[in-house]
Amino acid sequence: MNATVAISFVACTVLVAVISWYKTRSVNLRSVSGLFLAGKNNNYLVVAGSLLLTNLSANQFIGENESVYVNNLSVMAWGVTSVVAMLLVSEFLLPVYFKGGMVTTPDFLADRYDEGTKRLVSIIFLLSYMVNLLPPVLYGGAVAMTGMFDLPTWFGVSYWQCIWIMVWILGLVGSIYTIVGGLKAITISDTVLGGGLLIIGICLPWFALKTLGNGNIVGGLTALLTKHTTHLNAIGSATDAVPFSTLFTGMLLVNIYYWGMEQYIVQQVLVAKNLAHAQKGMAFAAVGKLVTPVLINLPGLIAVHLYPSIENTASVFSVLAAHVLPSVLLGLTAALVFGAAMTTYNAGLHGSSTLFVLNIYKPYQAKRSHVTTDGELVRVGKRFEIAVSLLAMFTAPFILFAHSGFYTYLQKVSGLFSIPIFTIVVIGFLTKRVPPSAAKAGLLFFMVSYFTCQYVLDISLHFLHVLAILFGATSLLMLAIGRRWPMQRHQTAEFVPDVVGLAPWKRRHWASLLLILAMLSLYVVFSKWGVAT
């Protein structure tokens, strides 16, 4: 690692931190609203930036490029088809959240079912973050930084030891950033990093294509489009990482859950100044999801041509960036990957704290007739963040021994937690007859069944199809319980006066149409009717 790379990395990282501090210096971080809700005053650009950067992490840089390198472009479906889910969430879920004045996603479940369901789902959320969000984010960031800087050589340690070192550096920096800055600092840094990602999204493919074309970018593009064209196919077969059929089953369910119910994502939208800004921010973030394949997937495609036999496929992105980028841009890229890992980690850590403090600790103290103050809740939240962060730092390095591909591992484990919650939320929206006991039974049935199908029985069906089948089975179970023992007292969300503004964005339907057409165009281009001939 030369001095220019190091200076560029440090300068960019410090700049983001300084801007975040400057923009948050007036926020009262000793109050629940200031620490957990960022004052509920973010405009649509901040919402869009924080959504996009919270979604983007080193996991995608590492995992999706690995999948493209090993399989083909079918993995882009995770990002591109998110557009449909984001539009559905914007149109149907966000108005409910804003009307109900909700702070966490399980708040809806308390209104629809009961406090017990809300508490149970909050615990499942926390388990999901501790198992399948925070440790993988640290691991992905460690892999990326290790590859770009060739840190084992620089530190004089083994690859395994270097992963441990980087996991702890990322974890400690992320913890301090979250505990000191709160949600406002996270959203501001997301917006700043968004501009940097746009720069790298253009520069990395440019220099990689020039390298592929021996200094001629047109030659590189020609080679990319005429050789190894099977990798350009986004219409996945049954043997690919993402079969095309799963776009209409489990993937749609997972994406709706992620953008509309995942606490650390939804929290970025709920801090918008009003519903119109929230919907507009979601639409701008959807535009970002359509262009991110240039950054997330194109490097893997180019690596197929430049490095036909990489042994550690998880290092594809890092190897390419270190090989083709000038030192200044490599430092900037490393800073952005570092920042992307941090923003997702910070948001997950902050979401965990919010869920624990507001949905578990505060109600527990209320039952004991103890009146909690803002200062007490803030202190408990910060201590909880420290404990969760330490757990993530101790467990993250062991992901190195996962047998399946990194990104497939993440998505498969995620289904254990996400779709059961998605199921009871959907049924809660569709009918008022289903009682709280059905929601609890549905959660237990889904999680046990999915775990059995994936880790006990040898089922050849793709895990996304399994998720869709279990969603249907669990829905039928809950409806059957509701028919036999219908809910006698209908819970309804209490209407909150128009404090934040409940008027929807007037141009959202035109924006939705353009986004859907753009998504379909991408699939036509990257298919046998387009460049994947």
Image (tube, grey):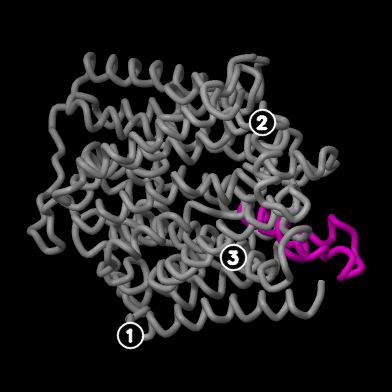
Q: Quadrant of residue 269?
A: bottom left
Q: Which mark is residue 432?
A: none
Element on which disc 2 rests: helix
Amino acid type for the residue under numbered disc 2: His
Residue drawn 71% across the image and 39% down it: 223
Closer to the chain start, of discs 3 and 1, is: 1
The overriding secondary structure of the stretch rendered in magenta is helix
Assess disc 1: are there few (<14), some (14-19) or many (≥20) residues with their C-alpha within 10 Å of its C-alpha.
Answer: few
Q: Is residue 482 left or right of residue 314?
A: left
Residue drawn 49% across the image and 57% down it: 348
According to the picture, the residue beneath numbered tag 1 turns out to be 26
Can the viewer see residue 377 in this picture? no
Amino acid type for the residue under numbered disc 3: Leu
According to the picture, the residue beneath numbered tag 3 turns out to be 336
Closer to the chain start, of discs 3 and 2, is: 2
Amino acid type for the residue under numbered disc 1: Ser
CA gap, disc 1 and disc 2:
50 Å
Q: Pointer 3 and pointer 1: residues touching (CB < 8 Å)?
A: no
**Measured from the top left, where is residue 245 in percent x and y?**
49, 19
Assess disc 3: are there few (<14), some (14-19) or many (≥20) residues with their C-alpha within 10 Å of its C-alpha.
Answer: many
**Measured from the top left, where is residue 197 in percent x and y?**
53, 61
According to the picture, the residue beneath numbered tag 2 turns out to be 231
Residue segment shown in magenta: 137-166
Q: Of circles 1 and 2, which is in front?
A: 2
> Within the magenta stretch, is there residue 157?
yes
Q: Is residue 521 left or right of residue 113?
A: right
Q: Quadrant of residue 64?
A: top right
Assess disc 2: are there few (<14), some (14-19) or many (≥20) residues with their C-alpha within 10 Å of its C-alpha.
Answer: many
**Measured from the top left, where is residue 496 in percent x and y?**
11, 56
Element on which disc 3 rests: helix
Q: Of circles 3 and 1, which is in front?
A: 3
